[in-house]
Amino acid sequence: MLFRLLFVLSVIIWSVNATSLMELTSLMVLTLILLLSAQQGALFIQRSVFLLLWLIFPILLLHSFFTPGTYISLGFYFPITNEGLMQGLHLCMHMLLMYFSAALLLKIISKHEWLFMLSFWPKADSYFKPKLLLLQRLQVITMNRVNEYVLHWKKTNNYRMLPETITQLLVVTIGDAKQQAFSLWQDWELNQANPTQKNEGVALMNLKDSWYLLMCVMGWGLLWKL
C-alpha cells in the first residue's frame, strides 16, 4: 500500500518535471496500462476520454491559433503555429497525467486501505473518515438517482426540459446527501463500536507492492541518469 502511494506520487512528480513529449507520452502509457489492470479501468478510461475531450480540444486549439511563432505549412491557409501546437500539447499532456494519476491513486488503493492509513493520523482521520464513509453511502444512491432522471428525460425527449431535469436532480442529490449525513451522524457511535470497515487483511506492504517499488526505483534511476 505504501509503495503504491509512493509510486503514484512519483508519477506526479515525474510528470511535473517532464520537459519533452516523449517523456510525457511514456508516463501516460504507463499510467493507462496500470489503470487498465485495475477494476473497471477500461470503462473509466472510456468515459473519461469522452468528457476530457471537451476540455482538451479548446485548450489545444486556442494555443495553436493564438501563440505567436512559425506557421505550419499544411498546403492551405490554417494559422497554426508550431510553438503554439507544442505548448498546447505539453499543457494537455500534463493535465491528462494529473487527472489519470489521481484516478490511478483511487483505483489501486481501496477504501479499506485509505481508512487504514488515516487511522495513523488522528487529525486527518477525524476530518476525512466521515467524508469517505459518506461518499461510500452516496455512491450507489447517486448513480441510481442519475439513471432514474436520465430515463425520465429520455421518455420526454424534450431538450427544453433538460435544464429543469438537471436542477431537480441536483436538488434531490443534495437532499440525499443531507439525509445520509444525518444517518451517519446518528449511527456514528455504533459504527465505531462495531466498525463495518474492517482492517483485516490490510497491510502496509505486500507482494503486490513490490512491483510498484520496482517500477518506482527504475523510474527514479532513469531520471537520475538523465
Image (cartoon, rainbow, N blue to C red):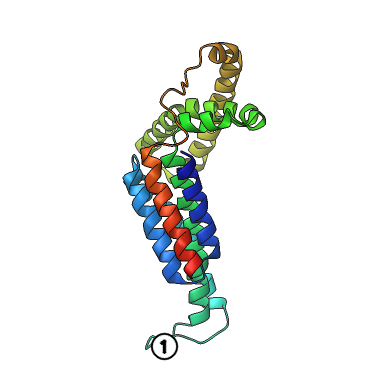
Q: Between residues 193 and 219, which one lies in front from this camera angle?
A: 219
Badge 1 element: loop
Q: Quadrant of residue 184?
A: top right
Residue in view at x 40 percent, y 36 percent? 206
The reply to whether residue 95 is in sight is yes
Residue 51 left/right relative to 120: left
Circle 1: is it few (<14), some (14-19), or many (20+) Cα within 10 Å?
few
Image location of residue 112, percent across then percent down: 46, 28
Residue 83 left/right relative to 42: right
The residue wearing badge 1 is 73
Residue in view at x 58 percent, y 22 percent? 181
Residue 163 position (above or below residue 197): below
Residue 38 position (above or below residue 189): below
Residue 49 position (above or below residue 19): above
Image location of residue 224, percent across then percent down: 50, 65
Image location of residue 62, percent across then percent down: 53, 71
